[in-house]
Image (spheres, rainbow, N blue to C red):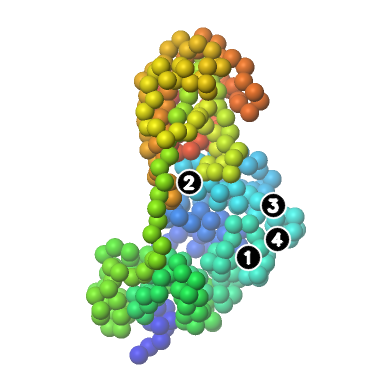
Amino acid sequence: MKSFSKKLLEWYNPASRNLPWKQTNDAYKIWLSEIILQQTRVEQGTPYYLAFIKQYPTVKKLAAAPLDDVLKLWEGLGYYSRARNLHVAAQQVMEEHKGKFPETHAEILQLKGIGNYTAAAIASFAYNLPHAVLDGNVFRVLSRVFGIETPIDSTEGKKQFEQLAQQLLDNKNPSTYNQAIMDFGALVCKPQNPLCEQCPFSSECKALELNKISLLPVKAKKLIKSERHFHYFVLFDAKDIYIKQRTAKDIWKGLFEFPVYESLQSTVNSQQIVSHPYIKKYGEPSTIDCRLSYKQTLSHQYINGHFYEIKLEKLPKFDKSYLKIPKTTILNYAFPKIVRSYLEDRLNFLT
C-alpha cells in the first residue's frame, strides 16, 4: 500500500481551488486569509480578503489603520474578535518585529489571535516549514480514513490527532501536503455527501468499511445556545439619530448600535416603552412605530433584535457615550448584522 502522503499528493491538483491566497508566499497575505476563513466559508470570505488586501496591502498599513475602519471593512463577516485581534497582531508585528512578519512557528504563535492551526498554516505555506495543519477538514479526513472515534474536542483527541497529523506530514513538501489535505477535506471527504467513489483511500477507509461516514469525526461536547432579546430604541428627529458603540466584554465589541436594553421578554408594547425608565429621559415621543423584529444566530447564542422607531421633535442631549449623527451618515459606521438588516429595510424611512 502506498503511503498516505504519497496517495494524497498524487490526488492533489493545485488548480482544483484557484484561490488568491494560494498564489503567494507572502506571510502577511496568508495570515490575513487564514484569519478571515476561520468560521467562514471560502465563498463568503474571498471578497473580504480581496477588500482587505486592496485597503491594507501591507501589515504596516493595517497596523496604522483606526480600529473603527477595520471593523467597518469586516462588517457582515461576524466573529468580530477576529478583526480586533488582527489589528492588535499587526501592531505587534510592527512593534516587536520591526514590520517583518515572524518566520518561526514559535514566534508566529505569539501573535494575538493565532493558535496552533493558524501558526502551522502560515509557517508551512509562507516558509515551507514542517508543521502539520489540523483544521476541521483535516480532523474529518483523518478520523474517517483511520477510523478514530476519540472526540476531536477532547484533550486526548487533540493530542492523538496532532501526533498523527505530524507523522503523516511530507516533510519534504509540507506546504503542498497541507494544501492537499485541506483541499481533499473540502472537495472529496466533505461533511455531507462525501465523494467516496472518487476517494483514493476508499479501499482502506475505516469509516467506509464500517459504515460510519456520518458518525465521524466525533464531538463530545453538545453545544447549548442561549437566547437573548435586545430591544433597540431608534431615536431620531428630522435631521439626526443616536447610536452608541458597544464597549463591554460581550458580543460585537467595538460595533455600533442604537440605544438598547436587554430583557427576557420578546414583546414590549408601546405603553411599556413610554413608561420604561430607559426611555423617559429622552423626552416625550411624537410617534412610536410598530416593532420590527430580526433574528441572528451566533455560534453560542440566538439573538432577537426588536426595533422601536421613536420620532422626537428634537433629540435631547445624552451623555458622551452616545453619538448624535446626521441620519445620512449612518452607513459610515460598522453595525452587527442584525442592525444592518434593519437599516437595509428601513433606511429610506429614517433618512
Spatial distance from mark 4 to mark 3, Cα to Cα? 11 Å
The residue closer to the viewer here, 316 or 329, is 316
Left or right, 211 with reference to 12: left
Does 226 sit left or right of 98 as displayed? left
**Which amino acid does the dot numbered 2 rest on?**
Gly
Circle 1: residue type: Leu
Q: Which one is earlier in the sequence, the residue at label 4 or at label 3? A: 3
Chain-order first, disc 2 or disc 1: 2
Where is residue 125 shown, x and y percent of the image?
55, 68
Q: Quadrant of residue 7?
A: bottom left
Q: Nearer the viewer, mark 4 or mark 1?
A: 1
- Residue position marked by numbered label 3 in the rendering: 91
Name the residue that disc number 1 marks: 109
Q: Which of the labelled discs sits on residue 78, or is there none?
A: 2
Q: Give the mark toward the camera: 4 or 2.
A: 2
Which residue is at 63% across, 42% downward? 67
